[in-house]
Image: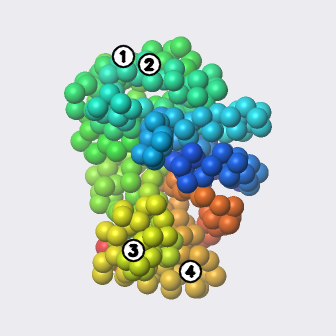
Amino acid sequence: MEKRRLGRKDIHIAPLVFGGNVFGWTADKKTSFELLDRFTDAGFNAIDTADAYSRWAPGNEGGESETIIGEWIKSRNARDKVVVITKVGSDMGQGKKDLSAAYIAKAVEASLKRLQIDAIDLYLSHWHDPDTPYEETLGAYQKLLREGKIKSIGASNFDADQLRAAIDVSETKDLPRYNVLQPQYNLYDRGEFDGRLRELCIAENIGVITYFSLARGFLSGKYRSEADLNKSPRGDGIKEYLNPRGFRILAALDAVSARHNAKQAEVALAWIMQRRGVTAPIASATSLQQLESLIRAAALRLDNDDVAELDKAST
């Protein structure tokens, strides 16, 4: 499988990233191991997680996803087979978003221990921290890069102004630069990335891996009314998509998927994979059946008419 270069650094990933937010939440350890086995056997290599996954689930405190990934890597001797992506800066009990140097130094050690690895391939600032100067955060990453505890850095949930400011600080202060952006992006949620942010990433050769690539599952096509919302723990978040624009997008997905004998989720992911400026979408699965669909999406090629129909429905 052809790998795509992720930003300026020499990191190459397959065109689909597995979203580890489900590990320790809607996928238990046994299921998570089965999913990771199949994902890597199919030729994919990038796993996305965060220290805060899955702190939101009752009884969890954060770190559950990293722990499961670490146990899988160790049990399968799979360190050389995967690109490990994790994040820092979410509220892990400190009561705020935190990208201070002191917090990063502590958090990276906890992530490395849970993941049972010597170095994180890609370490992302999970959120913009308005209380910490970019210079302090990037300086903390510089230290970790020199120590060999991380290999590359990126940002998640940054807007165009924030990413531009961070890049400027990197250039003027001779500090490491964000090489990857992780924005929310899908057929429905296009406003955060399309426009200035996408053009900045293209101009600066910043790799882009998108999250909520299936709009919390809405673009799978299985949520057509409020009666369907109990099909997922994310039902409350999906409700906002049940509107005329959302239904218009589903109709376009139905039409394109029928022409390709594919599922709606596969078409929605293929659309992202073919977007200029996007390296790969992140997508999660909680069953092998769902995962097989994600795998098929990587081989699906949409033609110009397909893309035009989807674009029209989603604008």
- Label whose residue precedes the other's in the sequence (2 or 4): 2
Instruction: Left or right? Give the position of 267 relative to 179.
Output: right
Q: Nearer the viewer, residue 138 or 50?
A: 50
Q: Amino acid at mark 4?
A: Ser
Question: What residue do we see at 43% from left, 84% from top?
Answer: 251
Residue occupied by mark 2: 106
How dense is the environment of label 1, judged by Cα within 10 Å: few (below 14), some, or many (20 and up)? Answer: few
Q: Nearer the viewer, mark 1 or mark 4?
A: 1
Q: Sequence-wise, which precedes: disc 3 or disc 4?
A: 4
Which mark identifies residue 311? 3
**Mark 2 residue type:** Lys
In this rendering, position of residue 148 left or right of residue 183: right
Secondary element under disc 3, as helix, strand or loop, is: helix
- Using the image, tell me which numbered label, if any, was put on residue 140: none
Q: Earlier in the sequence, mark 3 or mark 2?
A: 2
Which callout, 1 or 4, points at the residue further toward the start of the chain?
1
Using the numbered discs, state the Cα–Cα distance from disc 1 to disc 2 in whole angstroms: 7 Å
Question: Relative to residue 245, is residue 283 depicted above or below?
Answer: above
**Which residue is the site of mark 1?**
102
Element under disc 4: helix
Q: What colouring does the structure picture have?
A: rainbow
3 or 1: tag closer to the N-terminus: 1
Residue 44 seen in the current view: no
Residue 257's label in the rendered image is 4
Q: Secondary structure at mark 2?
A: helix
Identify the residue shown where x is 35% and y is 34%. Answer: 91
